[in-house]
Image (tube, rainbow, N blue to C red):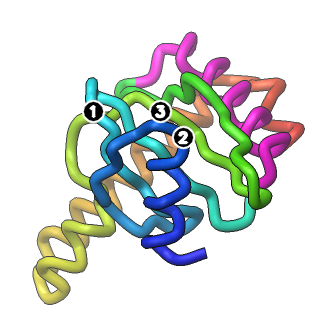
Amino acid sequence: MDVDNAQESLRRLGFHPQFVADGMEGFVFDIGDTLLAKVWHTRAASDVRLLRSFYSELSGRPLPYRTPRIRDILEPPGGLTVSIEERLPGVPLHALLLREPDNDVLWREGMRAVVSVLTALDAAGDVPAAREL
């Protein structure tokens, strides 16, 4: 699956997708109204449903940041899995680091951000859906 095929699949579902990014696990498209569509490279719909449960459980925890919210999971013809998600504010850390690969301050702050996310997840306690991932 390439980005053009993913975009065409979304058009056939009635969306007007605008390419945003090629993430680690799928292509991401803006579909309007603060929503994104993610066309997963390899995850089946059952895997994405588990991920949605995990995110849902996390959203009820006192975390210092927002977590993804999967509103819907679609299975168009061709064996694809598409999740419809709320757009989170901000810029992916990876994108910032790629823009300034020699910026040591940015890399140190990025590492601190990752550690703070992991620390907050640890403090959130047991998340039963995580055992299924």
Is the residue 31 above or below the residue 24 in the image? above
Range of magenta residues: 44-63
Q: Which residue is mark 2?
A: 13
Q: Between residues 131 and 3, which one lies in front from this camera angle?
A: 3
Residues under labels 1 and 2: Cα distance?
14 Å
Q: Is residue 96 left or right of residue 78?
A: left
Determine the residue positioned at 22% across, 52% down: 91
Q: Earlier in the sequence, mark 1 or mark 2?
A: 2
Residues under labels 3 and 2: Cα distance?
15 Å
Residues under labels 1 and 3: Cα distance?
11 Å
Say whether marks 1 and 2 touch (CB < 8 Å): no
Q: Which residue is mark 3?
A: 85
Tell me the tag on residue 32: 1
Q: Between residues 97 and 124, which one lies in front from this camera angle?
A: 97
> Which type of secondary structure does the marked residue at label 2 adopt?
loop
Q: Is residue 45 left or right of residue 60?
A: right
Occupied quadrant, residue 20? bottom left
Tell me the tag on residue 91: none
Q: Nearer the viewer, mark 1 or mark 2?
A: 2
- Residue type of the residue flagged with mark 1: Gly
Residue 56 in the magenta stretch? The answer is yes
